[in-house]
Image: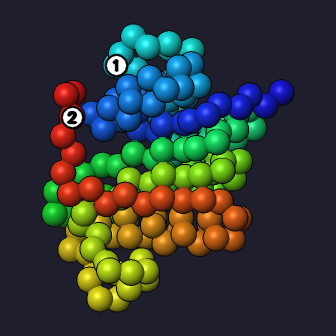
Amino acid sequence: MIKKYKFLIIGSEGATGRSVFNTLNKSFPNRIFRTDRSPPLNSYKKSLFFQLDLNDLQACKQIQDKYHFDTVVYLSGVWKGQTTDISNFMENFLPFNNFINTIAKATKHIIYFSSSLVRSDGDVSEALVTTMPKSSYAMAKVSSESLLIKFCRDNLIKYTIFRPFHIVSPY
């Protein structure tokens, strides 16, 4: 039997993830599922948390088969500075690609936290042409945005892309 939840927060144990969880939990207690590749840092209901490495496609498929979510907040990302190392690109893009090809298929709305390193006044494809990112992290974010837009348009799923400049959190 497939279990349905209001929200899934991917990357829930970082400072931003904890802030998003605490804010949503006030309005939707016990309706928020959290996941991270790290063990849970707080004492909130651990039954609504699962440790998941999005690089593990089989684990993503198991989540896809067991759970559906109205909204997914995708916060996961690994910043290693202004490197152009391809491994940093892969470390950020491949987990998102696995998410899109599994868990995202059964959601109604995806909220993707990108980066201010991705600058564009319009379509993401313009960012690729006019403002080529200077780091592999930013390129992974641009590529993920493009994948998200195409996937959501093709599957009639709502999406929101945030490109925060600064994140301030009590954590």
Badge 1, how many Cα within 10 Å: few under 14, some, many 20+?
few
Q: For the residues marked 2 and 1, what is the alpha-carbon distance in whole angstroms?
A: 15 Å
In the image: residue 125, left or right of residue 134: right
* Residue 169's disc number: 2
- Tell me which amino acid carries mark 2: Ser
Q: Residue furthest right?
A: 1
Task: Work out whether residue 66 can be spotted.
Answer: yes
* Residue 128's disc number: none
Task: Work out whether residue 9 or residue 52 is closer to the camera in this orientation and state it.
Answer: 9
Q: Quadrant of the C terminus?
A: top left
Q: Position of residue 23 (x, y in %)?
A: 38, 30
What SS does tag 1 mark? loop
Task: Work out whether residue 80 or residue 117 is closer to the camera in this orientation and state it.
Answer: 117
Task: Work out whether residue 94 can be spotted.
Answer: no
Picture residue at 54% right of the left edge, 36% below the top: 8
The nearer-to-camera label among 2 and 1 is 2
Q: Position of residue 73 (x, y in %)?
A: 48, 44
Picture residue at 69% right of the left edge, 71% below the top: 154
